Image (spheres, rainbow, N blue to C red):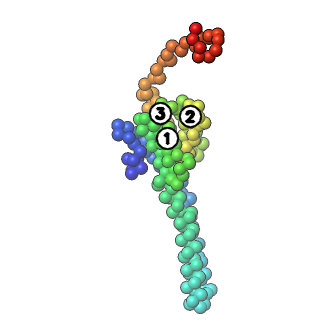
Amino acid sequence: MGFVRSVVAPGEELIVHSHPHWRALVRPALVAVVGAGLAGIAGGFVESQVVHTGDRTAVWTLVGVLYLLLVLRFALWPAVRWARTDLVVTDERVLYRPAGSNRRSVDVPLARLSAVRFRHTLGDRALRTGTLILEPGHLPPVEIDDVPDVAGVHAAIYEELLRLPPPPPPGPPAAAPRFRWGLPGRLR
């Protein structure tokens, strides 16, 4: 919640705050469990096959270090990235900040959005997730993957778009400058 407090301006109303869908945590959990099983099998092999105590200690240390590296890289880091990635929708803008990536941060004022769409497959529908597509005017579309309850987020953004005041009508066209014969800057 610290990130949200730091980016939401006074007077802005928070509409949606979410992290990526929970299915992003399935692979890290499986890596931790399968890695623990493989470390246990390796430990059993060490206990039954390695005779010398010094060698046994070295191999146990190697197994433990390999398991720790595996868990840190493929289980803990994705879980931290999931927890630190935020999608925030306020009554004035849409913010998306993936963890560890300053290049992909998105901060789009609602007044600049020309279209909001979402896309989800059959599997995404079963899990109530999908891809949110924001089209900010003349810029290329921004796609945000693994948005939980993507239809609800789409509806919330669309509802906020409808609450915005309509753009002002165009003013009268400016008069074209009069063409004068002669040198530029010379008065007649």
Q: Secondary structure at mark 1?
A: strand
Nearer-N-terminus badge (3/2): 3
Residue hosting label 3: 110
- Judge whether 38 appears above or below 174 on screen: below
Dot 2: what SS?
Answer: strand
What separation in Å lies between label 1 and label 3 (alpha carbons)?
A: 10 Å
**Residue at 62% in and 10% down:** 180
The label on residue 166 is none
Q: State whether residue 36 is above or below residue 105.
A: below
Q: Nearer the viewer, residue 7 or 27?
A: 7
Residue 93 image offset from top left, x and y in percent: 45, 37
Are there few (<14), some (14-19), or many (20+) residues within 10 Å of tag 3?
many
- Categorize mark 1 by other alpha carbons within 10 Å: few (<14), some (14-19), many (20+): few
Q: Quadrant of residue 64?
A: bottom right
Residue extending farthest right:
182
> Element under label 3?
helix
The amino acid type, in three-letter code, at marker 2 is Glu
Q: Which residue is mark 1?
A: 107
- Seen at 38% across and 47% down, the residue is 5
Tell me the residue at 52%/32% (across/down): 113
Q: Residue 187: in sight, yes or no? A: yes
Q: Position of residue 69 (x, y in %)?
A: 56, 69
Q: Residue 56 at x, y = what percent?
A: 57, 86
Please state which amino acid type lies under the numbered disc 3: Leu
Q: Residue furthest left?
A: 11
Name the spot of residue 20 as percent of width and height, x first: 50, 49
The Cα–Cα distance between marks 3 and 2, rounded to whole angstroms, is 10 Å
Q: Give the labeled residue for mark 2.
A: 135
